[in-house]
Amino acid sequence: MADFNYTDKGVMDYKACWDLQEALLASVVEEKRRLGHPVAKNHFILVEHPPVYTLGKSGNENNMLIRKEFLDQIGATYYRINRGGDITYHGPGQLVGYPILDLEYYQIGIREFIAKMEEAIIGTLGAFGLSGARREGATGVWLDPEDPARARKICAIGVRVSRFVTMHGFALNVNTDLRYFGYINPCGFNSSAVTSFRQELGGEVPPGEVKAVLKEQFNLMY
């Protein structure tokens, strides 16, 4: 079982949180170097961000459907960042999780790590009566992924690994304002394929309840 050091940052500026992740990753890498072996020094940041669009290092800027000048009008910012994946949106009502851990210690690769994250999200959805699943050829968690007419994404995942240590993570739509997805092709998919707990369940879901279940699920990852 992974011994995560959970830190709930509430609402935090995206760049400040990115810098925090980089500092934590560097501290884990430095400890590995100093000790000469993998370490079980795990961090897990839970956070919400003010409206922001982020584009992964291999992402296509054409999936941003608005000019950057329009961002001020909708109260959003934009960053090109060093994770995998394409463009996504973070904002209030969305639960974002950044696990920072040493994959070498757990003797797993990046694909298995992502699969474990997806499984933890699927378990969290199940606790609220939602049936999440993977979609072939895509990273993240979906509802009805096998039905092209109904498939909709509820959780995006994108990570970076340096010296086997992870950063970035997942974005789970809980009470997210989905209108912001209308300005992008999230993760390269049409914006109509995005959903949230609130949309599926017909009302607000207490974020604290989702966080509690999420922690239980992630503690079962290893």
Image (cartoon, rainbow, N blue to C red):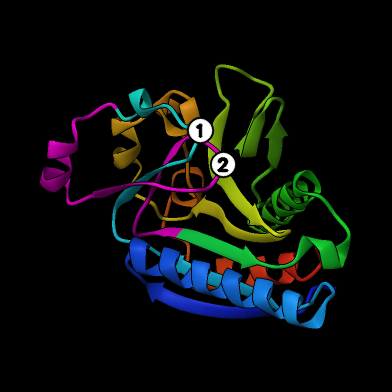
- Residue at image point 51% right, 73% down: 23
* Viewer-nearest residue: 213 or 137: 137
- Front residue (pair 187, 196): 187
Mark 1 closeness class: few <14, some 14–19, many ≥20 residues within 10 Å = some
Q: Does residue 59 show up?
A: yes
Task: Tell me where residue 92 appears, x and y as whole percent.
Answer: 34, 59
Residue 188 position, x and y percent, is 47, 26
Is 222 part of what is drawn in magenta? no
Relative to 159, does residue 153 appear above or below in the rendering?
above
Would you say residue 83 sits in the magenta stretch? yes
Q: Secondary structure at mark 1?
A: loop
Residue sitting at the far top: 149
Question: Circle 2: is it few (<14), some (14-19), or many (20+) Cα within 10 Å?
Answer: some
Which kind of residue does numbered mark 2 sit on? Answer: Gly
Circle 2 — which element?
A: loop
Say which amino acid is labelled 1: Ser
Q: Position of residue 10 (x, y in %)?
A: 40, 75
Q: Position of residue 130 (x, y in %)?
A: 64, 47
Give the residue at x 74% y 65%. Answer: 217
For disc 2, the marked residue is 84
Residue 147 versus residue 16 in the image, above or below: above
Q: Residue at x 81, y 48 (%)?
A: 112
Residue visible at 65% across and 28% down in the picture: 145
- Which sits earlier in the primary sequence, circle 1 or circle 2? 1
Q: Which residue is mark 1?
A: 58
Q: Which residues are magenta?
A: 65-94
Q: Quadrant of the C terminus?
A: bottom right
Left or right side of 119 for 107: right
